[in-house]
Amino acid sequence: MTETTKHHASAAAANAAVATEAAGALRDVLSGDSAYRRLLLKAAAGAGKSYVLRQLVAAAVEHRNCDRVAVVAFTNKQTWPLAVELGKLLGKERVCLFPSAAKVGAVPQDVWDHASVASSTANIPSTAKVIVSTVHKLGAIGELGRQSSRFGAGKNGEQPFDVLFCDEAWQVAHHLFDKVTKAAPVWVGVGDVGQLPPLEVGDNPWRGDPGYNPYRAWPTGYGDLADTWVAELPAVWRPTAEQLPLWRAFYPEWSELSCVAAPGDRVVSFSGTVDAPVAELWATVATGRPVLAEVDGLPDADAPDVDEPLMRFVEYAIDAAFSAGVELRAARYDETGTPTGESDTRSVGASGDPLITVLATRNQAVDDAAAAVGRLAEAHGLTDADLTSSTVDSWQGQTNGITFGVHPLTGAAKLDEFNSAFGRLAVVATRATRPAARHSPRSRRTASRCPRASRYAPW
């Protein structure tokens, strides 16, 4: 990988160039001037891929050989912002969110304001050119047939949509994507790579094919084919410049990876004094560098009762931050990546993405995290916008300020389900502007790869 020092507009321009190239490739496919059938746009976490996806959808909808497109994602929460932003870009009458009947009540008002919403094919407006749905909904038995019966074939003459877009494509497994492949003759996948566990093919290959695994992300089966166009977005918008080494460690195959944010563009500060036992921890987090903290005095990482004392340390550290008046400040940029001279400040009581999120990988830790968040919320008068907890898998694709990831490692000497969970945790940590991880003392090998490793007694 070429380790460049580009920031601001020079870094953002590299992404813009790839986006322009992707839009041109898609137009060539729709015009019949290209033999490509699939376009895969790889993005590191925080690369601004959602913006690029919207531009590609717009390019398709405006093309003379495209009548309707489908945009699918893995979760309902991922479809909501897609529908909102596409509605703003293309007009409410041209975009329809297509959720299941059971999920209609959960659709945010913002979606209703900018897109139509229909839970049945019969209720989709005839003006809708963009259908936004989960893979499960569009891939339900008979759904593509109902789409064809209701609207007929697209300009391709056979399938109901002319282009199938997949957001967070590397989060969608083969066996799920297989259900929607007949929706359109052209597929466009955009997403952060490496979101599914890196499961390997076993001794008994699926369908007798040693290269096939239905639980791998679907783009992994097509990236090397001659009729697949592949490119990487070479810059990231979300992380701090100080976090870039971690991003590069996760995406070693990238030819280049730079950062829009320059040193000092993102700042963590406190209006008061942080308690001494965790002052060093928070001082390190404030530098923008990811923190891998070792907690001494805990049970063995494999012990069934390790999660609760580990979570108590996390609760103590977060309590100290809120008691000291934690605040995040970030420079604003225009769409070219140029600083505007203004900044956004995030503190307790503000709206938007959560200030702090606690993520866990094991059932007991998930329950302990929810309980800890409840106690802290009551003690400090917090809302979900200040502090929340979730599972690693549920939080993929969402964004927050500071992440506390909880996973008692065994040493990661081998790839099993337990240790691959840490891989997903680490990927999700890149969703934050300030990632911090917690684990028990046995993970020496993993700690040595982290930009900063500190040791703490329980307190």
Image (tube, rainbow, N blue to C red):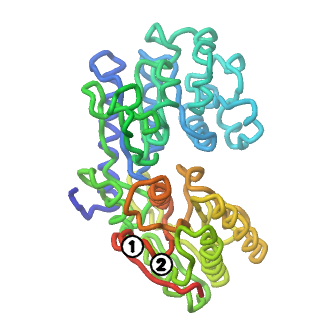
Residue 11 place in picture, x, y as percent? 31, 56
The mark tally for this picture is 2
Local crowd size for mark 1, using a 10 Å CA cut-off: few (<14), some (14–19), many (≥20): some
Q: Earlier in the sequence, mark 2 or mark 1?
A: 2
The residue at 55%/84% (across/down) is 297
- Judging from the image, what secondary structure is the residue with disc 1 in? helix
Q: Quadrant of residue 186?
A: top left
Local crowd size for mark 2, using a 10 Å CA cut-off: few (<14), some (14–19), many (≥20): many
The residue at 38%/40% (across/down) is 202
Q: Quadrant of residue 457?
A: bottom right
Residue 40 place in picture, x, y as percent? 36, 35
Amino acid type, callout 1: Ala
The residue at 50%/62% (across/down) is 432
Residue 403 visible, this orientation: no
- Image height of 333 relative to 205, above or below: below
Residue 294: mark in rendering? 2
Q: In front: 370, or 270?
A: 370
- Image height of 410 relative to 234, above or below: below
Residue on which disc 1 sits: 447
In whole angstroms, how far apart are the C-alphas of marks 2 and 1?
8 Å
On the rendered structure, is 23 left or right of 440?
Answer: left
The residue at 75%/68% (across/down) is 374
